[in-house]
Amino acid sequence: MTADTAPTDTDWVATARTLSQALPLFQRYAGATVVIKLGGHAMGSDEAMRSFARDIVLMSHVGVNPVIVHGGGPMINATLEQQGVVSEFVDGKRVTDAATIEVVEMVLSGLVGKRIVQAINAEGGRAIGISGKDANLMICEQTDPKLGFVGTPVECNPQFLQSLRDTKTIPVIAPIGAGRNGETFNVNGDTAAGAIAAALKADRLLLLTDVAGLKDASGDVVSEMTPEAIRQMTAEGVIKGGMIPKTQTALDAIDGGVRAVVILDGRAPHACILELYTAQGAGSLIRTPR
Ligand SMILES: Nc1ncnc2c1ncn2[C@@H]1O[C@H](COP(=O)(O)OP(=O)(O)O)[C@@H](O)[C@H]1O
Ligand SMILES: CC(=O)N[C@@H](CCC(=O)OP(=O)(O)O)C(=O)O
C-alpha cells in the first residue's frame, strides 16, 4: 500500500467501530442454522444473484449453517407461457394439474436450483441442489383437491442435512414434495422454507422478497414486531396479498420452534449479511417477546 492510498485515521476509526459492532454478532451466529428463502422476485439480475451467493459463502466461512430454500414462480410462469398455458392462483397457490407439475419440477429442480448452486460455487462455496423428494426431506399431502398437485408438508426428515453440514456443503432446496403414493407435489416456497426451518429448529428464517420489509398503515417499514402485532395488522387489512402467506409462514415457523423470522428485500445488495451482522439489521424481525 502506498502513502497515497493509506487509510486515514478517520477510516481506521470507522473500520474499528464497524468491526467492534460486528464481532459480537459473528459470535452470536457461530454454529447457528439460518434458513434462507430466496423468492423468484428476489433473484432478478445476475448481479443480485452474485451478491446473494457471496453472502451465503461468507456466512458458511464464519461458522453459520446456511440452508437455502428457493422459489421461482416467475420462471415457472415464463416456461408455461412458452407453452401457451396461463396459471390460475387461489390464495397465492398455483392450481397445478398433471402437466403443470412436470413443468414446475423441471423449472425449480433444474433451471432455478442449479442457477443458485452454480452462483454459490462460483464464489468459492460448495452447494448441492436437491428437492423435498431427496432422502424424504419433505413428505406432503394434497392441500385441496381443487388445487390439484399442490402439497402441504406433513412430515420433514432433515437428519441427512447434518451430513451435508459436516462436510460444509450448502443445501439448495427446491420446494417439491413427495406424496405417500408416489405423487409429486408443488409446495409454495415460503411454506416449504417454514416447514424445513421448523424441523431444523432454526435460529433464523430469512424470507427474501421484493419489499424492504413489513409496512404499517402509513407505509413505513416496521423493524421489529410480535406475532400478535402481525395478527392485528392482518385483521386490519394492512397486511394483504402475497404478504399474507409469508406472515402466516412466519407465525407457523415461530410456533414450530424457529427463534425469529425476518422479512427483507432480497434485491438489496448483501441483504443477508446486513441483516445478520449489523446492529440495525435489514428488514422486519418477527419474534415472540422474551
Ligand atoms: N403490509 C405489507 N408490507 C409489505 N408488503 C406488503 C404488505 N401487504 C402486502 N404486501 C405485498 O406483498 C408483496 C410480497 O409478496 P409476494 O409478491 O408474494 O412475494 P414473493 O414473490 O417474494 O414471494 C409485496 O411486494 C407487497 O406488494
Ligand atoms: C403452490 C405454489 O404456488 N407453488 C409455487 C412454487 C414456487 C414459489 O413459491 O415461487 P416464489 O417464491 O418465487 O413465489 C409456484 O408454483 O409458483
Image: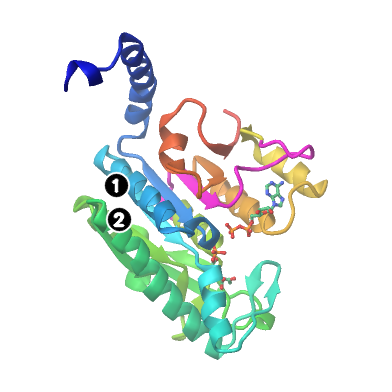
Q: Specify whether residue 107 is painted magenta.
A: no
Question: Taking 181 as reference, is 108 above or below it?
Answer: above
In the image as oriented, which residue stretches furthest toward the right?
236
Where is residue 17? Give x, y as percent.
Answer: 37, 15
Give the camera-side residue of 167 and 289: 167
Say which residue label 2 marks.
120
| Circle 2 residues within 10 Å: few <14, some 14–19, many ≥20 | many
Q: Quadrant of the C terminus?
A: top right
The answer to which quarter of the image holds residue 120 is bottom left
Where is residue 160? Give x, y as percent.
Answer: 29, 61
| Residue range corresponding to the magenta coloring | 199-221
User: Which amino acid, by three-letter code, is at mark 2?
Assistant: Ile
Where is residue 1? Give x, y as percent.
Answer: 16, 23
Asked whether the viewer can see residue 101, the reply is yes
Q: Residue at x 40, y 53 (%)?
A: 47
Q: Residue at x 51, y 72 (%)?
A: 75
Element class at badge 1? helix
Predominant SS of the magenta segment: loop
Give the camera-side residue of 99 and 258: 99
Asked whether the viewer can see residue 203, the reply is no
User: Which amino acid, by three-letter code, is at mark 1?
Assistant: Val
In three-dimensional space, the C-alpha distance between marks 2 and 1, rounded to whole angstroms, equals 7 Å
Q: Residue at x 48, y 55 (%)?
A: 37
In the image as oriented, which residue stretches furthest toward the left?
1
Q: Quadrant of ligand 2?
A: bottom right
Q: Is residue 271 left or right of residue 89?
A: left
Q: Is residue 137 left or right of residue 60?
A: right
Say which residue label 1 marks.
57
Give the camera-side residue of 115 and 24: 115
Element class at badge 2? helix
